[in-house]
Image: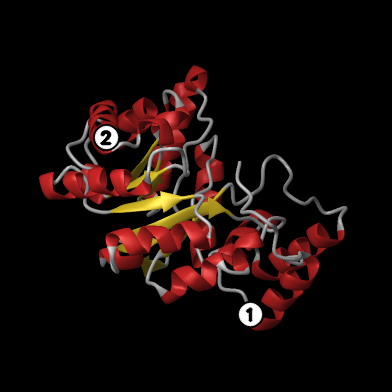
Amino acid sequence: MRFRQFGSTGRQVPIVGQGSWKIDNDRRGPAVAALRRGLDEGMTHVDTAEMYGDAELVVAEAIEGRRDELFLVSKVLPSNASAEGVVRACERSLSRLGTDRLDCYLLHWRGSVPLVETIEGFEQLVRSGKILSWGVSNFDVADLEEALRIAGPGKIACNQVLYNLEERAIEHEVIPWCEGHGVAVVAYSPFGHGSFPDARSTGGEVLAEIAEAHDATPRQVGLAFLARAAFVIPKASSPERTAQNGAAGDLELSESELARIDAAFPRGPKPASLPML
């Protein structure tokens, strides 16, 4: 597993981590097993959110006894993002996760609460040691610029955004901005939303050919392509799938292979607004 510095935090974090959106609490045992297998494979960046229902409780069970290995991330809903609301929401997440701290805490998306209040709450949590860093999610460049003006440089650890082979809008401006300001980019839904290209499509055929050359799977090739510019946090429903995801962290694609994927999945024009799920 390759590691990379996570924005301004100074922490080295695996390029392939684990998401928890839509973890099925009715199948809690397999979900816990999948997360634990990921930890065994070095996928110690674990992402969750208060919006994800019981996901924080499932994550808590999976990480019990292994907290110090982790780069643990959760997110606050915009409706809870006032200066005082952020603190209360974080304390609830900490309780559900069974830990005394988060390595990074994110605003899930922009809401009606002024950003200055949210950042005030984040900074209070940093001072109290309940979070070690903070970041944002689903922020376009204008939102990032506003956060930078409020907080100053070196404060925004990451921007977690929708990024997959068929949704590459962030490559136009968001990724360059983040690279220029030392902000990590984290890709959620890196396989899309139930729409990963199959071998019958042109793009799927390209992925399959490249995968065969590396004794890998098309999904591993897709993750490796995205991980050249972002941390990726796929969710897996089984230990076997988790291990397959983790192996993408060792897969290095050649310039010609990257060019083939780029041509098969063109980024398209810059959209009017940043896409999100």
Q: Image height check: is 218 above or below 124? A: below
The label on residue 179 is none
- The quarter of the rendered structure image containing the C terminus is top right
> Quick one: 103 or 86, which is closer to the camera?
86
* Residue 11 can be seen, yes or no: no
Local secondary structure at mark 2: helix
The residues bearing labels 2 and 1 have C-alpha atoms spaced at a distance of 42 Å
Disc 2: which residue: 90
Q: Position of residue 177 (x, y in %)?
A: 49, 71
Amino acid type, residue under disc 1 in the picture: Ser
Expressed as whole percent of the image width and height from the top left, the position of residue 274 reads 61, 54
Q: Name which residue lies at 42% across and 23% down.
A: 54
At x 45%, y 38%, the residue is 112
Graded by Cα atoms within 10 Å as few (under 14), some (14 to 19) or many (20 or more), the crowding at tag 2 reads many
* Observer-nearest of 186 and 86: 86
x then y, percent, for residue 9: 27, 63
**How many numbered discs sit on the rendered protein?**
2
- SS at mark 1 in the image: loop
Q: Judge from the rendering whether residue 46 lies leftward or rightward of residue 251; answer left or right.
A: left
In the figure, residue 221 lies in which quadrant?
A: bottom right
Give the camera-side residue of 212 and 99.
99
Q: Which mark is residue 254?
A: 1
Q: Is residue 139 left or right of residue 84?
A: right
Task: Tell which residue pokes out farthest to the left in this image.
Answer: 128
